Amino acid sequence: MNKATLFLQGSARRWLDVGRHGSLLFAALLGMALALQVGSANAAGTTTASLEQTYVSSADLAGPALPDDPSNESVVAYNKSIQLYQEREYEAALETMRAAVRARGLVDDSTGLAYSNLCLMYLRVGKFLNAEAACTRALMLLPNYIPAVLNLARAERRESPE
C-alpha cells in the first residue's frame, strides 16, 4: 500500500476512536481521500474514481450492482446479494455473496467490490474476524478503496454498521 492509503487507514481508525463527534473529521478525511483518488489508475489501467463516487455518502452501502450477465453465475449471485442486503436480509445476502466469490466468475474490480461487500455483510452479522479477512482481501485487490478501509477499521474495533 502507498503512504496515502496507510495514512487514511490510520486516520479512519482514529476517527472511529473519536466516536460520533468525529463526523467533521470524517468528512474532511473522505474529501482528502477522494481528491487523492481522482484519476488514479489501478493495475488494469482503469480509473478508480467511479468506484469512490458510488460511496460518497456512506461506507455502509452494499453495491454497486454489476451489469446483468445471466450466463455468469458469479454476477447473478453478486447482484442478488446486493438486492438482499438492501432488503435487510443480511444472512441471506452474506451467503449469496460468498457464493458469488466462490464461483470465481468476477473479473477486474468486481472481485475487490465483492470482498468489500462481503466484509460489510460480515460486520452486519457480527462476524468480525471474517470481516477483517474479507476487507484485507478487498484492499489487496483495490488498495485505495475507501469503503474497505473504513470497514476494516470497524472490523478491528468490533463495531457493526448502524
Image: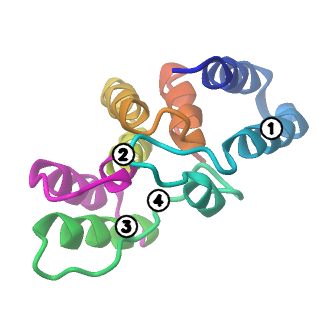
First in residue order: circle 4 vs circle 3: 4
Query: Label 1 belongs to which residue?
Result: 32
- In this figure, which residue is indicated by the disc labeled 2? 112
Marks 4 and 3 in Cβ contact (< 8 Å): yes
Q: Are marks 2 and 1 in contact (CB under 8 Å)?
A: no
Badge 2 local density, few (<14 within 10 Å), some, or many (20+)? many
Is residue 19 shown left or right of residue 46? right
- Residues under labels 3 and 1: Cα distance? 28 Å
Of marks 2 and 1, which one's residue comes earlier in the chain? 1
Distance between mark 2 and mark 3 Cα atoms: 14 Å
Q: Position of residue 82 (x, y in %)?
A: 37, 67
Indicate which label's residue lies in the foreground, 4 or 2: 2
Q: CA distance from mark 4 to mark 3?
A: 6 Å
Query: Which-is-in-front pick, marks 3 and 1?
Result: 1
Which residues fall within the magenta stretch?
A: 87-113
Q: Secondary structure at mark 4?
A: loop
> Considering the numbered disc 2 on the image, is that residue within a helix, a strand or a loop?
helix
Q: Look at the picture and state if 70 lies above or below 9.
A: below
Does the image show residue 95? yes
Q: Main secondary structure of the magenta part?
A: helix
Q: Please name the amino acid that badge 3 sits on.
A: Ile
Q: Is residue 159 visible?
A: no
Q: Residue 84, how many percent across, how many down? A: 34, 69
Identify the mark at residue 82; answer none if there is no mark.
3
User: Which residue lies at the image location 27% right of the left edge and 64% below the top edge?
Assistant: 78
Q: CA distance from mark 4 to mark 2?
A: 13 Å
What residue sits right under mark 4 in the picture?
62
